Image: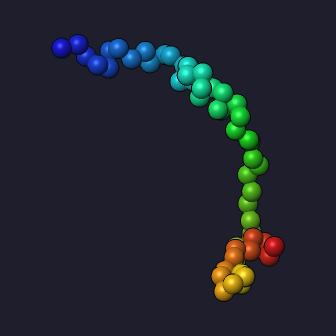
Amino acid sequence: MPDILSDLDLGEDKMSDPVRETQAGLRKHLPKRFYKQATVAPGGEGGFGVALDGK
């Protein structure tokens, strides 16, 4: 029985799928955000919200 792992080319680029390459190009690069304070704030209709740095 041939070894299944021997068929894998470990040096091959992981992004060889054209659909995944296109999807990776469409992703938005968002800035990382850090908050000093996160609190629970009263929300509408008896719910709650999250206030980040008091906003």
**36 up-or-down from 26: above or below:** below
* Residue at (77, 49) in percent of width and height: 31
* Residue at (43, 15) in percent of width and height: 9
Query: Residue 41: in sight, yes or no?
Result: no
**27 up-or-down from 51: above or below:** above
Q: Is residue 13 left or right of residue 40?
A: left
- Name the spot of residue 50 as percent of width and height, x first: 70, 74
**36 up-or-down from 34: above or below:** below
Outermost residue to the left:
1
Count the numbered circles shown: 0
Q: Is residue 23 left or right of residue 29?
A: left
For the residue pair 37 and 47, the one nearer the viewer reads as 47
- Name the spot of residue 44 as percent of width and height, x first: 72, 82
- Name the spot of residue 26 as percent of width and height, x first: 71, 34
Q: How is the image coloured?
A: rainbow
Outermost residue to the bottom:
46
Which image quadrant for residue 4? top left
- Name the spot of residue 6 as percent of width and height, x first: 32, 15
Location of the C terminus (image quadrant): bottom right
* Residue at (69, 84) in percent of width and height: 45
Which image quadrant for residue 22? top right
Outermost residue to the right:
55
For the residue pair 29 and 43, the one nearer the viewer reads as 43
* Residue at (65, 82) in percent of width and height: 47
Query: Residue 7: in sight, yes or no?
Result: yes
Location of the N terminus (image quadrant): top left
For the residue pair 12 and 20, the one nearer the viewer reads as 20
